[in-house]
C-alpha cells in the first residue's frame, strides 16, 4: 500500500497541504466536519448581508475532483491514537494513517464565560454568519413594531465586543447598513438613528498594527458613526445587553444584538493531542510544535494553522511567533507537505520559515488600513487606496474564478447602489435568541 496521509480540517492550511501533495505517490484522506472550504476573511460579508454563502464557500469534493490521490470524507474527529496511528470519528469509524496533519483551526473564546455565548455569537462558521445576520435584520424588524421608546432604542443599539480586524469590519459595516442600506425601507423608524458601539478592552483597536494605523482606523470608524469605547472590560452579558467597566467606572449598554469578536481558542483537538502524545499546549490551547511543525517524539504528526503555536525559523534570526492569519496557515500547509516528501525520500525535515506579507483591515466604504512588509521597509497607508488594495487582494485569493467574478460584481453593485442583496432570513424566530419573536403589534 502507498503511504497514507490523513489531513484533519480543510481550511487554508489543510487545503494547501493536500494540494501540495498532488504529485506525490501517496493516498490522501481529507476529513472535515463540514462539506465546504470557507474563505473566512470575507465571512463578515455574509454576516452583514453583503455576500451570499456560495460566494465565499466551495464544496470540498469539488475542489479535489481532479486530484485523484485525494479522498474526501465528511466527519468529525473525536479521538487520535498516536501509537496505533489511527483516528476515530464521531460515528465510531476509524481511519489509519502513516502521516497525520492536524489543521482543525480555532473556535470562539469567551475567557471562561461560555454562558455568554447564547447572547453574543462569535463569527467562525457559516452558521455563525447566518445567526448574526438574522439578529441584526430582525432587530430592525422588531424596532418597526415596537411602541415603547426605551425598548426600541435597545433594539437599535448594536454592540460589537472586540477591536481586532473582525470587530472593526463588523462595526463599520453595521453602521453602513443603518445609514445607507436601510433608510427608506421602514415607515415607523429611521434606521439612521441606530447606534453601533465597538467595545475594546485594550487602549486601541487593531493591536497587531502600528499605532498610527490603529488611530487612523479609529478615526475612520468614528466618521462612519461608530462609537468606540477603549479600555472597556466586559463583565457580564445577558439577553438585555452587557455591562463593562472603564477607568471612569461601570457602565451598562442595553442591546438586543451583541456580537462577540474578542477571543479565539484553539480546536478541542489540541487537548486530544496533548492527552495522547504528551505535547504542550499554550494558554490559548494551541499545540506547541517543533521547528518543522511536528510534535516532540512524534515526527509523523504535524500541526498547522490556528491550532499550532508555531515559530518562524529564518536563518540568522531569532525565532518569532507566527500570527494566526491565512497566509501563515497556507505556508504551514506547504511546509508540512514538503516535509512529508522529504521524509519519504529519507531526507531530514526542514524548519518552517514564515514570510510576513503584512496586515489588512477594512473599516467600511472607502476606508481601510494596510501595513505591508517590503524589502525596502514597511509600507503603510489608509483610506480609499487602502480600501481598493484590500478589495482586490481578497478577490485575488478567493477560490475559483466563479467566486471571484460573483464577488466583484456584487461589490460593484453595492458600491453604486448601497444595496446589500443577501438579506433573506429563513429562521425568523430562533430558539437561541428569541428577542424578535416577542413583538408588540403596530399601533392602530
Image (cartoon, helix red, strand yellow):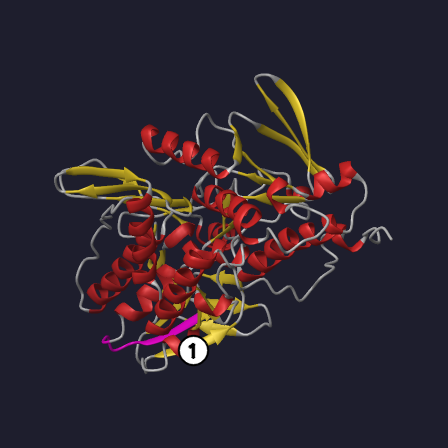
Q: Where is residue 371 in the image (x, y as percent from the top left)?
A: 28, 40
Residue 25: tell me if it is visible: yes
| 345 relative to 366 in the view: left or right | left
Left or right: where 64 falls relative to 340: right
Q: Residue 263: horizontal and vertical position, in percent? A: 51, 41
Which quarter of the rendered picture does the N terminus lie within?
Answer: bottom left
Number of other residues with Cα within 10 Å of mark 1, as a class: few under 14, some 14 to 19, many 20 or more: some
> Residue sitting at 63 percent across and 51 percent down?
136
The percent position of residue 90, horizontal first and vertical second, equals: 59, 68
Q: Disc 1 designates what residue?
A: 61
Q: Say whether residue 264 is magenta.
A: no
Relative to 18, does residue 397 appear above or below in the rendering? above
Q: Is residue 26 covered in magenta?
A: yes
- Residue at 58%, 28% in the rendered image: 233
In-image side of 92 versus 367 (left or right): right
Nearer the observer, 386 or 208? 386
The residue segment tinted magenta is 23-30
Residue 206, quarter of picture: top left
Position of 309 with respect to 20 (left or right) is right
Q: Which of 255 and 259 is in front in this view?
A: 255
Find residue 340 and report its horizontal and vertical position in percent.
Answer: 26, 65
Amino acid at each position: 500500500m502507498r503511504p497514507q496521509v490523513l489531513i484533519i480540517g480543510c481550511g487554508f492550511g489543510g487545503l494547501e497541504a493536500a494540494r501540495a501533495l498532488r504529485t506525490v505517490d501517496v493516498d490522501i484522506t481529507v476529513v472535515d466536519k463540514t462539506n465546504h472550504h470557507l474563505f473566512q476573511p470575507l465571512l463578515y460579508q455574509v454576516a452583514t448581508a453583503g455576500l451570499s454563502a456560495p460566494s465565499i464557500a466551495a464544496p470540498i469534493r469539488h475542489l479535489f475532483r481532479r486530484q485523484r490521490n485525494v479522498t474526501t470524507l465528511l466527519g468529525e474527529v473525536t479521538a487520535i491514537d498516536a501509537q496505533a496511528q489511527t483516528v476515530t470519528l464521531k460515528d465510531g469509524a476509524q481511519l489509519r494513517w502513516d502521516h497525520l496533519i492536524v489543521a482543525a483551526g480555532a473556535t470562539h473564546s469567551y475567557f471562561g464565560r461560555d454562558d455568554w455565548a447564547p447572547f453574543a455569537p462569535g463569527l467562525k462558521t457559516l452558521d455563525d454568519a447566518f445567526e448574526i445576520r438574522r439578529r441584526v435584520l430582525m432587530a430592525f424588524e422588531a424596532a418597526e413594531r415596537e411602541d415603547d421608546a426605551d425598548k426600541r432604542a435597545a433594539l437599535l443599539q448594536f454592540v460589537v465586543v472586540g477591536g481586532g480586524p473582525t470587530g472593526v469590519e463588523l462595526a463599520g459595516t453595521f453602521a453602513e447598513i443603518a445609514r445607507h442600506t436601510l433608510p427608506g425601507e421602514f415607515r415607523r423608524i429611521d434606521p439612521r438613528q441606530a447606534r453601533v458601539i465597538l467595545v475594546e478592552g485594550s487602549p486601541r483597536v487593531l493591536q497587531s498594527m502600528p499605532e498610527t494605523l490603529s488611530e487612523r482606523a479609529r478615526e475612520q470608524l468614528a466618521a462612519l458613526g461608530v462609537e468606540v469605547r477603549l479600555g472597556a472590560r466586559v463583565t457580564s452579558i445577558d439577553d438585555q445587553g452587557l455591562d463593562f467597566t472603564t477607568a471612569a467606572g461601570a457602565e451598562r449598554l442595553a442591546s438586543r444584538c451583541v456580537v462577540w469578536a474578542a477571543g479565539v481558542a484553539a480546536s478541542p483537538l489540541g487537548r486530544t493531542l496533548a492527552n495522547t502524545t504528551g505535547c504542550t499546549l499554550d494558554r490559548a490551547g494551541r499545540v506547541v510544535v517543533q521547528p518543522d511543525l511536528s510534535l516532540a517524539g512524534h515526527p509523523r504528526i504535524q500541526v498547522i494553522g490556528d491550532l499550532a503555536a508555531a515559530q518562524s525559523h529564518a536563518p540568522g534570526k531569532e525565532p518569532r511567533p507566527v500570527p494566526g492569519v491565512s497566509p501563515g496557515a497556507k505556508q504551514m500547509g506547504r511546509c508540512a507537505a514538503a516535509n512529508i516528501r522529504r521524509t519519504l525520500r529519507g531526507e531530514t525535515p526542514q524548519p518552517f520559515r514564515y514570510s510576513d506579507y503584512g496586515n489588512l483591515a477594512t473599516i467600511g466604504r472607502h476606508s481601510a488600513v494596510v501595513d505591508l512588509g517590503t524589502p525596502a521597509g514597511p509600507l503603510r497607508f489608509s483610506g480609499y487606496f487602502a480600501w481598493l488594495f484590500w478589495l482586490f487582494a481578497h478577490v485575488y485569493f478567493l477560490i475559483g474564478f466563479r467566486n471571484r467574478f460573483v464577488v466583484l460584481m456584487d461589490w460593484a453593485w453595492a458600491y453604486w447602489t448601497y444595496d446589500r442583496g443577501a438579506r433573506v432570513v429563513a429562521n425568523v424566530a430562533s430558539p437561541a435568541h428569541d428577542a424578535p419573536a416577542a413583538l408588540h403589534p403596530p399601533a392602530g
